[in-house]
Structures are given as structure tokens and as C-alpha cells.
Image (spheres, grey):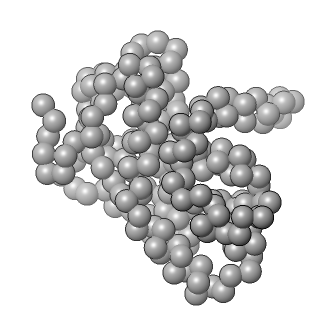
Amino acid sequence: MPKAGGREEERRLTADWLDTETKALLQRSPPEKLAPPDTRTFAIVLLEVAVQQGVARVSEDEPKRIRGPLPVCVKKGLSYSDAQIGQFELICRDAASVIIADEVVAKAPADYLADLYAKLRKIDEFELVTVRIDFVPDSPSGRAFCNRFLNEWKPDSPVAVKLMRKKVRIMQHWATRIGVPMTIVPTGGLVS
């Protein structure tokens, strides 16, 4: 049985990661562009999940994507700040999601939603990019970084990994704050 207040503590810890800059990095299009501005509740729609749950080392093979009954509405009736927390949790787990007004998800024709989701899936934020992580400090903030973004895996030496661009941008923000050298590898090249 979970401890009383456990969910609230988990929400608080996640909210600690959502500083103003991280919130801005989550969704570049304000919800007004996807929904009327007077919307009070929002839904999180899961668009795609990377096969590598967490982090996978880069190999010569391109990572495959899971194809299944996606997109799917994960949760409705959320405040915008709660939807941001959910979106942050999903991108940390290599899952592409968007925040859309409940009204749009509930009332839009199925063909409109299918077209919208297909367009959103193709934005550059969800493309895989290669990033090189030189090292992660052995400190509380370094361990928290690994737990949050690397599925508790701590690289022992420089490593290149493929992750969604959105996740990489958020990781870079936090890497700069805690002293993790991280570089995006140019397409077709290696960073020395």
C-alpha cells in the first residue's frame, strides 16, 4: 500500500524540475494555437514512444519506433500546469506527447484529429538526434540527472545516444546547470 502523500510528494519532486525555462522547452506552440484560449482543461495525447525505453547506445542500426494503437489520449481534465507535468514525465521516458484542449479532443471530427496528430508527429521536436555525454558528476545533482533523463543509467565514459530533440533540449538546460558536458553530434559526423 502506498504511503499517504506519496503521490503528492512525487508531484512536488517532478514540479521541482519544471522551472520556467523547462516549461518553455516543453511545448513551443501555445495551447491557444491548438485550442480556444478560454479552455480550462487539457488532455495529454501520446503520439509516439521510442523503442529504447530510457537510453540506448547508438549503434549502426537506426532505432525503430513502436507502431501500435497510437496516438492515444493519456489523460483528460487537467489544468495546464498538470498537463505540463505529465508531458515532462513522458518526454523523460522518451515518449512524444502534446497538450491539447479537452474540447478539441472530445468534439473534433476523427479525421481532423488524425490529420492533426500526424502533423504533430512530424515536427522536428520529436526527431531523433545524437548527443554525446562526456561525463556526469558523481554528486546528488548528477545522480538526479541520470535518474530523471537516463533511466538511472550513469555513463562511465563518454557515450553517444539517440534521443528526441525535445528531450535533448531539456537535458541540455539541466546539464548546463549541473556541469554535464553534452554536445549534439552533427548528422553524419562525430564530435571529437
Which quadrant: the N terminus? top right
Q: Is residue 180 left or right of residue 92?
A: left
Where in the figure is residue 141, as x and y percent of width and height? Answer: 50, 18
Tag count: 0
User: Looking at the image, can residue 90 be seen?
Assistant: no
Name the residue located 46 percent from the left edge and 39 percent from the top edge: 170
Residue at 63%, 85% in the rendered image:
110
**23 or 66: nearer the viewer:** 23
Kindly indicate the quadrant of the structure image that contains residue 178. Answer: top left
Residue 147 appearing in the image: yes
Q: Is residue 58 rendered to the left or right of residue 95?
A: left
Q: Residue furthest right?
A: 4
Which residue is situated farthest in the top direction here?
139
In-front residue for pair 38/5:
38
Seen in the image, is 174 located left or right of residue 82? left
Q: Is residue 131 above or below residue 127?
A: above
Q: Residue at x 27, y 34 (%)?
A: 183
Q: Is residue 179 above or below residue 115?
A: above
Q: Position of residue 143 (x, y in %)?
A: 48, 21
Q: Residue at x 44, y 33 (%)?
A: 173
Query: Could you say which is closer to the camera, residue 146 or residue 153?
Result: 146
Residue 31 x %, y %: 63, 61
Residue 44 x, y percent position in the rendering: 65, 59
Please identify the quadrant where the C terminus is shown.
top left
Residue 187 vertical position relative to residue 114 in the rendered view, above or below: above
Does residue 18 sit above or below 52 in this rendering? above
